[in-house]
Image: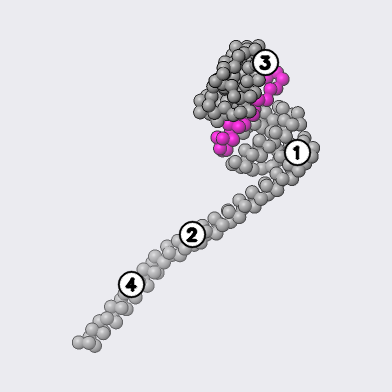
Amino acid sequence: MSDTDSFINEVSEEVRNDQLFGYVKKYGWIAIALILVLVGGAAYSEWTKAQDRAAAQAAGDALIEALANDDVAERATALAAVTTDGPAEAVTGLLTAAAQQSSGDLVAAKATLDALAASDVIPQAYRDVATFKSATIAIEGEDPAARRQMLQSLATPGMPYRLLALEQIAMMDVAAGDTDAAANGLRAILEDAAVSRGLRDRAQTLMVALGEEIEPAAAV
């Protein structure tokens, strides 16, 4: 019986081997394809990371070189030529606009900021900064209503630059001769618990210049 059992086991083992070989022959290409996909995907991922690192390094070097330029107009031109994306694009754009504004090219600065504010690929926080800075730039011949509208969009409750936007609106009211509206805006700033000391001081100074009384509770 033991020889018979051994023979049966050997035959069964050969049958299993033949079946396994058949499966491998029939479906082995799938396993090979999966291995190639996994290895290729890992290689592509590493290549992409290396490309991203190289691009970031190149952009950083270009920014440093541009910022090292002593001539503000040339600095603005160099910054505008730097190609970045995401948050780096926003930072580069803000630096470019600042250089353009410093060089006296307000039209270019405003255009740079407006492009950032309208972008849907950079974080909202940077877009808000760009909107605020653009609204503070007054270009000759520009309709003040457009600037006011931009500032009012930032002066709504909950917006991060609400108080600064209110200050700018009050200054526009002063320039337009509407001192009552300016005073009301300044009071709103002074009554806000989140007002910074510097902004409070500026608002109080402007209130005094307008001949308005400052409420004792608002004074520090």
Asked if the residue at tag 3 contacts the one at tag 1, i.e. Cβ–Cβ closer than 8 Å, the answer is: no
Residue 28 position (above or below residue 167): below
Read off the residue under disc 1: 75
Q: Quadrant of residue 183?
A: top right
Residue 19: image tag: 4
Q: Is residue 126 magenta?
A: yes
Residue type of the residue flagged with mark 4: Gln
Instruction: Quote the CA–CA distance across marks 1 and 2.
Output: 47 Å
Q: Is residue 147 visible?
A: no
Residue at horizontal 35 percent and vertical 72 percent from the top: 20
Q: Which residues are magenta?
A: 121-149
Q: Which mark is drawn over residue 37? A: 2
What is the distance, in whole Å, between disc 2 and disc 3 at their CAs? 73 Å
Kindly tell me whether residue 41 is visible in this rendering: yes
Q: Which amino acid type corresponds to the residue marked 1 in the rendered image?
A: Arg
Question: Mark 1 vs mark 4: which is more N-terminal?
Answer: 4
The amino acid type, in three-letter code, at marker 2 is Val
Tag 3 residue: 209
Helix, strand or loop for disc 3:
helix
Q: Earlier in the sequence, mark 2 or mark 3?
A: 2
Secondary structure state at the residue bearing disc 4:
helix
User: Mainly helix, strand or loop, the magenta region?
Assistant: helix
User: Which image quarter: residue 89?
Assistant: top right
Q: How far across and down, in percent of the image, does residue 193 sit? A: 53, 26
Image location (x, y in percent) of residue 118: 59, 31
Query: Mark 3 and mark 4: span between their CA atoms?
Result: 97 Å
